[in-house]
Image (cartoon, rainbow, N blue to C red):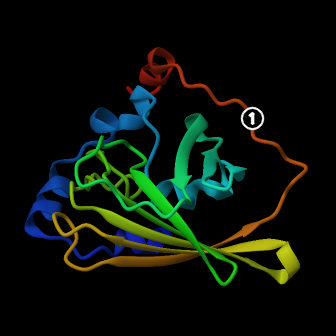
Amino acid sequence: MIREFRNLALTEKGEAARAEFDETLMTETADCVSWPTPFILAEAALHPVEFEQLNESEIVFRSEFYNTERRIYMDGREHPAQGERTNQGYSVGTWEQGVLVVDTKLFAEHRSPYASSGIPSGLQKHTVERFRLIDDGARLHVSIYVEDPEYLVRPMEAELIWNFAPDQPLQDAECDSEVARRFQQ
């Protein structure tokens, strides 16, 4: 998946953002701001994730990285025309033949959702993720589609395979920005 971040076809604005980016000074992770999709998904190899179905109308996606949470509304609603923009966006989901399809819009601007590239999330960023169990439920196939016309010339697509590890619960990973900033210098 990391190769997709390195080979992004960027707009002029995207190229300018990458050129001016200084990871030692401009990273939001030093301020305890978690990565949005797609990079939070790529980080599942290092920072485990879980899905919890709260009820028929809500699923919560959690990542161990900075205790990130995202709600996925499963009740048939549409994205609001005008809504609060958040780092994780506004997600609506459906089940399609056993595949969880998560459509997310209303992302807040984030300096680097595509790894440490410095290419921001644009206000028109839109993602579609598909989560499908494989290997008799031992693994999860994740496909990711990202369009962000402000910064990307064309959509990005990637695939991941996650292993099922129910005996490894998420650890509390609170972030202290004062401590995180000390390691940035």
Left or right, residue 31 beside residue 84: right
In this rendering, the answer to whether 156 lies above or below 20 is: below
Q: Nearer the viewer, residue 124 or 120?
A: 124
The amino acid type found where label 1 is placed reads Gln
Quadrant (top left, top right, bottom left, bottom right) of the C terminus: top left
Image point 85% across, 72% down: which residue? 138
Left or right, residue 2 beside residue 24: right
Residue 72 rendering spot, x and y as whole percentages? 54, 54
* Residue 88 visible in the displayed image: yes
Q: How many marks?
A: 1
Q: Which residue is mark 1?
A: 171
Farthest left residue in view = 12
Label 1 SS: loop
Residue 97 rendering spot, x and y as whole percentages? 66, 84
Farthest top residue in view = 178
Q: Nearer the viewer, residue 23 or 32?
A: 32
Residue 21 rendering spot, x and y as whole percentages? 22, 47
Q: Nearer the viewer, residue 60 or 7?
A: 60
Q: Quadrant of residue 100?
A: bottom right
Q: Nearer the viewer, residue 76 or 180?
A: 76
In this rendering, the answer to whether 130 lies above or below 73 is: below
Left or right, residue 121 beside residue 104: left
Residue 61 rendering spot, x and y as whole percentages? 61, 50
